[in-house]
Image (spheres, helix red, strand yellow):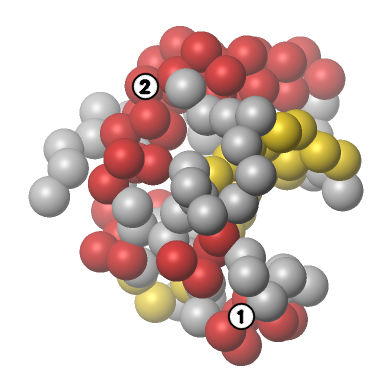
Amino acid sequence: MTNLKYFSKSEFKCGQVNCYDKMDRNLLEMLDVARGIAGVPFKINSSWRDEETNRKAGGKSNSSHLRGNAVDIHCNNSQDRLLIIDSLVTAGFSRIGIAKTFIHCDVDENLPQNVMWLY
Protein backbone atom coordinates (compact mmCIF):
# COMPACT_ATOMS: atom_id res chain seq x y z
CA MET A 1 0.00 0.00 0.00
CA THR A 2 1.07 3.53 -0.74
CA ASN A 3 1.80 5.71 2.29
CA LEU A 4 0.31 9.14 1.68
CA LYS A 5 1.27 12.26 3.60
CA TYR A 6 -1.79 14.37 2.85
CA PHE A 7 -4.62 11.85 2.38
CA SER A 8 -6.22 9.10 4.41
CA LYS A 9 -7.72 5.95 2.95
CA SER A 10 -11.16 7.07 4.15
CA GLU A 11 -11.17 10.03 1.73
CA PHE A 12 -11.58 7.70 -1.26
CA LYS A 13 -15.19 6.59 -1.40
CA CYS A 14 -17.84 5.48 -3.84
CA GLY A 15 -21.04 6.48 -2.10
CA GLN A 16 -20.47 5.25 1.45
CA VAL A 17 -18.09 2.44 0.42
CA ASN A 18 -14.34 2.90 0.83
CA CYS A 19 -12.59 2.35 -2.50
CA TYR A 20 -8.98 3.21 -1.66
CA ASP A 21 -7.88 -0.27 -2.74
CA LYS A 22 -9.37 0.32 -6.20
CA MET A 23 -7.31 3.47 -6.83
CA ASP A 24 -4.28 3.55 -9.14
CA ARG A 25 -1.14 3.83 -6.97
CA ASN A 26 0.62 6.20 -9.37
CA LEU A 27 -2.38 8.53 -9.27
CA LEU A 28 -2.35 8.52 -5.46
CA GLU A 29 1.37 9.28 -5.28
CA MET A 30 1.13 12.09 -7.85
CA LEU A 31 -1.92 13.50 -6.06
CA ASP A 32 -0.04 13.52 -2.77
CA VAL A 33 2.89 15.38 -4.39
CA ALA A 34 0.48 17.91 -5.94
CA ARG A 35 -1.20 18.53 -2.58
CA GLY A 36 2.18 19.27 -1.02
CA ILE A 37 3.02 21.72 -3.79
CA ALA A 38 -0.37 23.49 -3.70
CA GLY A 39 -0.33 24.16 0.02
CA VAL A 40 -4.14 24.06 0.17
CA PRO A 41 -6.41 21.15 1.17
CA PHE A 42 -7.67 18.81 -1.55
CA LYS A 43 -11.18 17.57 -0.74
CA ILE A 44 -11.92 14.55 -2.93
CA ASN A 45 -15.47 14.75 -4.32
CA SER A 46 -15.21 11.60 -6.41
CA SER A 47 -12.66 8.84 -6.87
CA TRP A 48 -13.30 5.27 -8.09
CA ARG A 49 -16.91 4.79 -9.17
CA ASP A 50 -19.00 1.72 -9.83
CA GLU A 51 -21.06 1.82 -13.02
CA GLU A 52 -24.28 2.91 -11.30
CA THR A 53 -22.60 5.76 -9.43
CA ASN A 54 -20.82 6.82 -12.61
CA ARG A 55 -24.11 6.89 -14.52
CA LYS A 56 -25.83 8.92 -11.79
CA ALA A 57 -22.91 11.37 -11.76
CA GLY A 58 -23.27 11.87 -15.52
CA GLY A 59 -19.92 10.18 -16.20
CA LYS A 60 -19.03 8.86 -19.64
CA SER A 61 -19.14 5.12 -20.31
CA ASN A 62 -15.33 5.08 -20.61
CA SER A 63 -14.76 7.27 -17.53
CA SER A 64 -11.36 7.02 -15.87
CA HIS A 65 -13.23 6.89 -12.55
CA LEU A 66 -14.44 3.38 -13.44
CA ARG A 67 -10.81 2.18 -13.46
CA GLY A 68 -9.63 4.09 -10.38
CA ASN A 69 -7.51 6.36 -12.55
CA ALA A 70 -9.23 9.65 -11.65
CA VAL A 71 -10.34 11.97 -8.89
CA ASP A 72 -12.42 15.11 -8.74
CA ILE A 73 -11.13 17.72 -6.29
CA HIS A 74 -13.58 20.21 -4.78
CA CYS A 75 -12.78 23.79 -5.74
CA ASN A 76 -15.02 26.84 -5.97
CA ASN A 77 -12.71 29.86 -5.91
CA SER A 78 -10.20 31.20 -8.38
CA GLN A 79 -7.22 31.41 -6.02
CA ASP A 80 -7.36 27.74 -5.02
CA ARG A 81 -8.17 26.75 -8.61
CA LEU A 82 -4.91 28.26 -9.84
CA LEU A 83 -2.89 26.68 -7.01
CA ILE A 84 -4.45 23.25 -7.58
CA ILE A 85 -4.08 23.26 -11.36
CA ASP A 86 -0.49 24.50 -11.19
CA SER A 87 0.38 21.81 -8.64
CA LEU A 88 -1.26 19.06 -10.71
CA VAL A 89 0.75 20.05 -13.80
CA THR A 90 3.96 20.31 -11.76
CA ALA A 91 3.31 16.85 -10.27
CA GLY A 92 3.01 15.40 -13.79
CA PHE A 93 -0.71 15.22 -14.52
CA SER A 94 -1.40 15.68 -18.23
CA ARG A 95 -5.20 15.20 -18.17
CA ILE A 96 -7.13 17.90 -16.29
CA GLY A 97 -10.76 18.95 -16.50
CA ILE A 98 -12.04 22.18 -14.97
CA ALA A 99 -15.58 22.75 -13.74
CA LYS A 100 -17.10 25.52 -11.67
CA THR A 101 -16.97 23.50 -8.43
CA PHE A 102 -14.32 20.84 -9.04
CA ILE A 103 -11.12 19.92 -10.86
CA HIS A 104 -10.79 16.50 -12.45
CA CYS A 105 -7.39 14.89 -12.88
CA ASP A 106 -6.51 11.43 -14.11
CA VAL A 107 -3.65 9.22 -15.20
CA ASP A 108 -5.56 7.18 -17.77
CA GLU A 109 -3.04 6.20 -20.45
CA ASN A 110 -5.84 4.88 -22.69
CA LEU A 111 -7.22 8.38 -23.26
CA PRO A 112 -5.66 11.40 -25.05
CA GLN A 113 -2.71 12.93 -23.21
CA ASN A 114 -1.66 16.59 -22.69
CA VAL A 115 -5.23 17.85 -22.58
CA MET A 116 -7.18 20.28 -20.42
CA TRP A 117 -10.92 20.72 -20.84
CA LEU A 118 -13.89 22.57 -19.38
CA TYR A 119 -17.14 21.07 -18.16
Q: Are marks 1 and 2 in contact (CB under 8 Å)?
A: no
Q: Quadrant of residue 21?
A: bottom left
Residue 27 visible at all:
yes
Say which element carries label 2: helix
With respect to residue 91, does 32 lie above or below?
below
- Of 48 and 76, which appears nearest the observer? 48
Q: Callout 1 environment at 10 Å: few (<14), some (14 to 19), or many (20+)?
A: some
Q: Measuring 24% from the left and 35% from the top, which residue is drawn there?
A: 4
What secondary structure is marked by label 1?
helix
Q: Position of residue 8 (x, y in %)?
A: 29, 46
The kind of residue on which mark 1 rests is Thr
Left or right of 74, for residue 41: left
Task: Say which residue label 2 marks.
Answer: 33
Judge whether residue 75 can be spotted in this image.
no
**Residue 36, percent from left and from top:** 40, 16
Residue occupying image coordinates x 60% and y 51%: 111
Q: Earlier in the sequence, mark 1 or mark 2?
A: 2
Q: Gap in Å between the C-alphas at discs 1 and 2?
A: 28 Å
Residue, x 62% and y 22% (percent of image)?
84
Q: Is residue 11 left or right of residue 83?
A: left
Residue 25 x %, y %? 27, 46
Mark 2: few/some/many CA within 10 Å (<14, 14-19, 20+): some
20 vs 62: above or below? above
* Residue 9 located left or right of residue 81: left
Please tell me the numbered disc located at residue 53. Answer: 1
Vertical placement of residue 38 versus 71, above or below: above
Q: Residue at x 39, y 41 (%)?
A: 27
Q: Amino acid at mark 2?
A: Val
Return the residue nearer the eye: 90 or 6: 90
Q: Position of residue 13 (x, y in %)?
A: 44, 65
